[in-house]
Image (cartoon, rainbow, N blue to C red):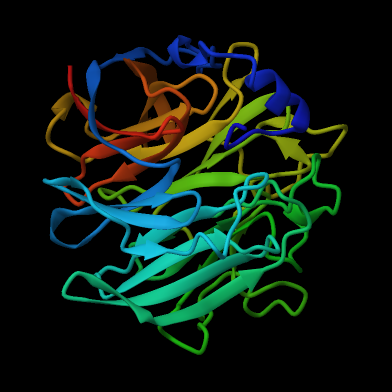
């Protein structure tokens, strides 16, 4: 079974395809946007069991989550034995499993995002001392029931403001049958912003956009998302970039500037990218994607990445690197003042790309469904 798909029909189709990792999907490029010519290579640094997510850890390490429930540490010696194993608490049915990991800014707390055996999205916290995980300190921070086994989202990141951001999909099935994307009374189809250290089990920041709205969940930072599988903050500017998986026609990259006050409506399920979905009407406050591409090629499911801020590829610095699960090509966007000024790729494929990880030094790692963990290096 493939890890991340959009319908049972696509699962059946993808299982028959063996060569998608070498193909390049077509994309709708902004008019006049020049091609970005940067070449790179992928260096295999480890192999894991269905790696799903990762985070920069203390002392230059990279912590890798395996979908079944393990967390392992990558350092100069390779990938170590699991430092955490919750495999008896989760399942890999559908799109479930251990889906996200994050450290706070001081590396004193570690967070995991997973779906439990009932399919409930769960965020747990562990204390970290001397770079070691203290499993006896585990506590649950937030839970959200899921009506279906797909569109869990699951990514978690600490923003430049020190708060924990949590991406949740619209609840699953297809076409957002419960209308969660535009419904502010649910956490589904949203990007959340909480302070896990400010309360029990957490506090809602006073400047969240809907804290004074009795009809909205105060945790919501942005809404109108279908399945925001991977998002990131630009380490250089603080801008937020979200790869939101489309329904049937359009994959999109959404953005918010670093000085955003939150409340962005990215349109789902009234919109799919810049296009009305099934006769929907564009919301007056719709924030269109900074980039979208259609599915006329071999792309089917965007995998959001990071703005590159490392030193190994100076010509790539400042460009957003992302991919697609079905296509696998590492693609790039040049961004200036929130506008795409260049579109390109790195001339390499990561196979079925599940996720990207940004190391503490700004270098990027690619996680493939085959288990390969690769570093993006100069060509």
The image position of residue 7, as x and y in percent, is 74, 33
Q: Quadrant of the C terminus?
A: top left
Q: Nearer the viewer, residue 166 or 19?
A: 19
Horizontal side of residue 86 vs 287, given as left or right: left
Q: Residue at x 84, y 38 (%)?
A: 280
**Image vertical order of residue 330 relative to residue 215, above or below:** above
Q: Quadrant of residue 16?
A: top right
Q: Nearer the viewer, residue 239 or 308?
A: 308
Q: Residue at x 61, y 38 (%)?
A: 288
Q: Quadrant of residue 276?
A: top right
The image position of residue 335, as x and y in percent, is 37, 32
**Image vertical order of residue 163 relative to residue 204, above or below:** above
Confirm whether residue 159 shows in the render: no
Count of labels in the image: 0
Horizontal side of residue 311 vs 317, given as left or right: left
Horizontal side of residue 71 vs 116, given as left or right: left
Horizontal side of residue 295 vs 102, given as left or right: right
The image position of residue 355, as x and y in percent, is 43, 39
**Image vertical order of residue 84 relative to residue 72, above or below:** below
**Image vertical order of residue 83 relative to residue 189, above or below:** below
Residue furthest bottom as drawn: 200
Q: Quadrant of the N terminus?
A: top right
Q: Residue at x 43, y 22 (%)?
A: 351
Confirm whether residue 177 shows in the render: yes
Q: Nearer the viewer, residue 245 or 41?
A: 41
The image position of residue 92, as x and y in percent, is 60, 48
């Amino acid at each position: 079974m493939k890890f991340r798909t959009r319908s049972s029909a696509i699962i059946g189709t993808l299982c028959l395809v063996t060569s998608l990792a070498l193909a390049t999907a077509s994309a709708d490029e902004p008019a006049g946007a020049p091609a970005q010519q940067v070449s790179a290579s992928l260096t295999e640094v480890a192999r894991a069991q269905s790696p799903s997510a990762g985070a920069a850890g203390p002392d230059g390490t990279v912590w890798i989550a395996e979908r079944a429930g393990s967390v392992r540490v990558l350092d100069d010696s390779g990938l170590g034995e699991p430092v955490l194993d919750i495999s008896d608490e989760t399942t890999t049915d559908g799109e479930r499993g251990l889906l996200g990991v994050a450290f706070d800014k001081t590396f004193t707390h570690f967070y995991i995002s997973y779906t439990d055996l009932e399919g409930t999205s769960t965020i747990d916290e562990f204390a970290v001392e001397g770079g070691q995980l203290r499993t006896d300190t585990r506590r649950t921070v937030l839970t959200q029931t899921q009506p279906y086994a797909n569109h869990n989202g699951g990514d978690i990141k600490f923003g430049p403001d020190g708060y924990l951001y949590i991406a949740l999909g619209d609840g699953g099935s297809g076409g957002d049958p419960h209308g969660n994307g535009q419904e502010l009374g649910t956490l589904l189809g949203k990007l959340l912003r909480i302070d896990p250290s400010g309360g029990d089990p957490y506090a809602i920041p006073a400047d969240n956009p809907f804290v004074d709205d009795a009809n909205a969940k105060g945790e919501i930072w942005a809404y109108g998302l279908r399945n925001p599988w991977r998002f990131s903050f630009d380490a250089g500017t603080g801008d937020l970039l979200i790869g939101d998986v489309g329904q049937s026609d359009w994959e999109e990259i959404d953005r918010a500037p670093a000085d955003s006050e939150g409340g962005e409506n990215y349109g789902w399920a009234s919109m799919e990218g810049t296009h009305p979905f099934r006769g929907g009407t564009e919301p007056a406050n719709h924030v269109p994607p900074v980039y979208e591409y259609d599915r006329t090629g071999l792309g089917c499911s965007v995998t959001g990445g990071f703005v590159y801020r490392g030193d190994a590829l100076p010509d790539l610095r400042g460009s957003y690197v992302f991919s697609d699960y079905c296509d696998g090509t590492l693609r790039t966007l040049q961004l200036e003042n929130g506008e795409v000024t260049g579109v390109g790729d790195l001339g390499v494929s990561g196979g079925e790309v599940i996720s990207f990880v940004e190391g503490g030094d700004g270098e990027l790692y690619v996680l493939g469904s085959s288990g390969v963990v690769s570093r993006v290096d100069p060509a």
